[in-house]
Image (cartoon, rainbow, N blue to C red):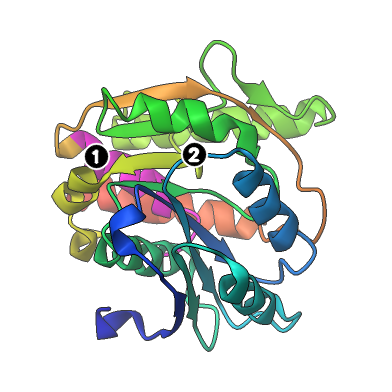
Amino acid sequence: MDSKFDSTVLSSNRDNRALKVAIVVPTYNEAETLSVLITKIIALGLDGIGFVIVDDGSPDGTGHIADRIAEKYDGVFIVLHREEKQGLGKAYMAGFQAALDAGADRIIEMDADHSHPPEVLPGLIAELDNADVAVASRYVSGGGVDPDWSWRRRQISYWGNVGIGIILGLTVRDATAGFKGFRRAALEAIGMDCLKLTGYGFQAEVAYRCQKADLRVVEHPYVFMERTAGKSKMSLGIALEALFRLTWLRIRG
């Protein structure tokens, strides 16, 4: 593991050769959701599934819960413990690198809060048979957001996404998607060392880097659901900061 990610690793890793797909999940205060998520994914019966949990020193004990799951899981289960919050982007970069080091052929990123339904995983993974990157998308036919969202929230989400797409010149419809799959070679082609944003704008930067690398990106429809427990980390300030940083990213290239 690259020391630049500054993580302590607990790994229950019985056979790297069996690892086909690594599910990378960043966590901060997800004690109420993590175990349920892992149970639902395992119940899908997908072949060669392993997990990389990146915990940013959650005070609610999420990291300890992940450790206990790792001890019992019959396969690859890596837990990265970071002493403090260092941003979503750095969490994903650490998780991606751990998945690559473990030999994963396919890498999936998803949230722990159940806003990304596990039942979407089989279709998303299958898309990678013919694509470099598969984006679980809210903004293609068949996709959408939680029906309980207010009109105002729908508009902010949609037009914020449109604005980011215009700023970066993206062709992908869901520019801020945090539910994605990558072929191993795609992550290697992007080059994680070149990723600059660590917060909310990280997902859009990844989309931008994928496009610049001429990777084949497909969008797989899904419905984004409101988190089932815990507290959202999103705020208007975070979103505005991301817009500023993404504009600067496009200017600098």
Q: Which residues are magenta?
A: 198-211
Residue depicted at 37% across the width and 70% down the height: 94
Q: Which residue is mark 2?
A: 177
Residue 151 as seen in the image, left or right of residue 93 = right
Amino acid type, callout 2: Ala
Q: Residue furthest top?
A: 141
Residue occupying the point 28% across, 57% down: 17
Vertical arrangement, residue 192 with respect to residue 216, above or below: below
Checking the image for residue 170, the label placed there is none
Give the answer, above or below, for where 92 lies relative to 225. below
Name the residue that disc number 1 marks: 210
- At mark 2, the secondary structure is loop
Q: Along the horizontal axis of the image, is 38 left or right of 183?
A: right
Report the residue at 17% width, 56% height from top.
Answer: 191
Query: Is residue 209 rendered magenta in the image?
Result: yes
Residue 94 as seen in the image, left or right of residue 112: left
**Circle 1 sits in a helix, a strand or a loop, which is it?**
helix
Residue at mark 1 to residue at mark 2: CA–CA distance? 13 Å
Q: Residue 145: image x %, image y %?
A: 69, 28
Q: Quadrant of the N terminus?
A: bottom left
Q: Is residue 115 above or below residue 113?
A: above
Q: Is residue 196 visible?
A: no
Task: Look at label 1 and name its amino acid.
Answer: Cys
Query: Residue 249 magenta-drawn?
Result: no
- Name the spot of residue 129 as percent of width and height, x first: 29, 26
**What secondary structure is the magenta-colored segment mainly?**
helix
**Which of the pair 95/210 is nearer the observer?**
95
When asked about the image quadrant of residue 106, the answer is top left
Q: Position of residue 203 (x, y in %)?
A: 42, 48
Q: Nearer the viewer, residue 240 or 207?
A: 207
Q: Position of residue 183 (x, y in %)?
A: 27, 41
